[in-house]
Image (cartoon, rainbow, N blue to C red):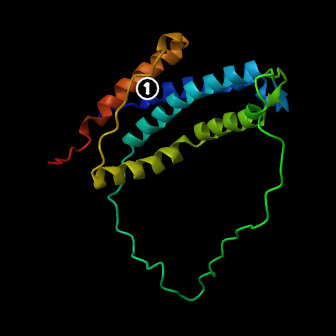
Amino acid sequence: MTDLTVFLLHAFRTIARAVAETGVNAGLFRHPELISKTLKRRVSAELKRLGVLLRRLIFLMALQVELAPLTPRPVRNYFEKTEGDPKPRKAFFSVLPVPASEAPDFLHGPVIVPTRAPVPAAPLIARWEAMLDTLRYRQRRARCLARTIQRWKADGEARPFIAPIPKTHTMPAALGLVSGGLTVQLIEALKDWPSFDTS
């Protein structure tokens, strides 16, 4: 496999800058309580598109990780009790009726006009911060994914299919180049995936 260090570094910097700029331009770093619906839709769409690129980057990094062979884990009987094991908790099932609440919007009829009120920003901020954390700990995530890929190969799973990302032409030039490069490099890296005869 070819050395992709320079490409991975460039792709990481480009994606990290795009993710950071998306949140900063929307003012998410100020932790607002409410944002407009339009802003939420625009930022959600951008984070979704960048999320695809980030997943592909980590997948490509995981394919580059060299791992030791899998060692078999010691067998443990779940039902056999040993000293010091905590007692299993019993599931709790409430028999009390659920208190009535306000009817959902779709039951009110066609008279309701959607409100133009702002929406909470907390879910969008949490998603943005989760992507930033993933970028920060990308090496750890790649190692964990490499173990999963190793198990997939050992179990005879089919090779993942990497489709081109749609609407790459609408991305900024740097992201478009990274998007195309990630697709090509992943297809190339997956060529040595073992194929198992199922007949």
Q: Which of the two residues, 42 or 182, is positioned nearer the viewer here?
A: 42
Q: Measured along the vertical axis of the image, is residue 172 above or below residue 37?
A: above
Amino acid marked by disc 1: Phe
| Number of numbered discs on residues | 1
In the figure, residue 91 lies in which quadrant?
Answer: bottom right
> Residue drawn 80% across and 29% down?
119
Q: Measured along the vertical axis of the image, is residue 197 above or below residue 190?
A: below
| The N terminus, quarter of image | top left
Q: Measured along the vertical axis of the image, is residue 103 above or below residue 34?
A: below
Question: Residue 182: image x %, image y %?
Answer: 42, 26
In the figure, residue 181 lies in which quadrant?
Answer: top left
Question: Residue 12: image x %, image y %?
Answer: 53, 29
- The residue labelled by disc 1 is 7
Q: Measured along the vertical axis of the image, is residue 173 above or below residue 185?
A: above
> Residue drawn 54% across and 41% down?
138
Q: Which of the two residues, 16 or 32, is positioned nearer the viewer here?
A: 32
Mark 1 element type: helix
Q: Which of the two residues, 69 or 33, is positioned nearer the viewer here?
A: 33
